[in-house]
Amino acid sequence: DAGVTQSPTHLIKTRGQHVTLRCSPISGHKSVSWYQQVLGQGPQFIFQYYEKEERGRGNFPDRFSARQFPNYSSELNVNALLLGDSALYLCASSLNPVPDTQYFGPGTRLTVL
Amino acid sequence: DQQVKQNSPSLSVQEGRISILNCDYTNSMFDYFLWYKKYPAEGPTFLISISSIKDKNEDGRFTVFLNKSAKHLSLHIVPSQPGDSAVYFCAASGSARQLTFGSGTQLTVLP
């Protein structure tokens, strides 16, 4: 059974550009969450979606947005990239919203130059 | 303001001995706690969880202890194996229904 998949694996962008990261949850999972992990820190919550509706938002600027599609896959969009956006972006899926156990994908490594 | 703290960035343990990883939290509204393990180039993997109505939960070699009065939890791994070498994250959730992670502890199990 396939786990959470994310694409792309790695991405290099320049300041001011826009980026879209994609996530496919485990089959049957209806909740998707996004996290940002900066080197040396734990994952930091960005968004949670359940049944295509936003269920939670972390302390991130409006440059960050996300959506969930009818097949429960999800996209994270970041506009006007800053150097500080360089991080590992993790997607996690669960049957139901937190506190259901979340299963993480391998992440997308974003580098902003 | 870090609501979940892992004060030990690293821990080395001899194979076969006990590994004890610690985590402190400040938010009294947290009611569910989890431990995740992370290998390089992989996403975090769920290990074990505990609800605030319990003080102990076991799963094989892994046991999590929760001390609500001290706002402290710990993960015990017995016996430790070289394959346990990874970064361990403590996480908590509460009424906000989002996971808050600690900064992680790098566990190295020496053969």
Image: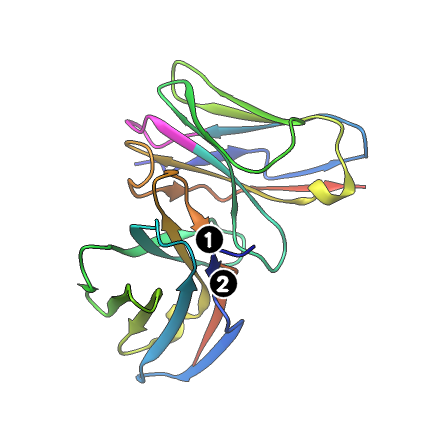
Residue beneath label 2, please?
B104
**Percent x, y of residue B58:** 19, 64
Q: Nearer the viewer, residue A108 or A68?
A: A68
Query: Is residue B86 rendered to the left or right of residue B76?
Result: right
Our reading of the magenta stretch's main secondary structure is loop
Query: Is residue A35 rendered to the left or right of residue A86?
Result: left
Q: Which mark is residue B101?
A: 1
| Category of crowding for the residue at label 2, using alpha-carbon neighbours closer than 10 angstroms: few (below 14), some (14–19), many (at least 20) | many
1 and 2 marks on the same chain = yes
Q: Which amino acid type corresponds to the residue marked 1 in the rendered image? A: Phe
Magenta segment? A24-32
In the displayed structure, A37 sits above or below B80; it is above
Circle count? 2
Q: Is residue B79 visible?
A: yes
Residue B28: quadrant of the picture: bottom left
**Percent x, y of residue B48:** 28, 57
**Percent x, y of residue B77:** 30, 73
Query: Is residue B35 rendered to the left or right of residue B78?
Result: right
Q: Nearer the viewer, residue A47 or A102?
A: A47
Task: Report the quarter where the C terminus of chain B lies.
Answer: bottom left
* Chain identity of mark 2: B
In the displayed structure, B6 sits above or below A93; it is below
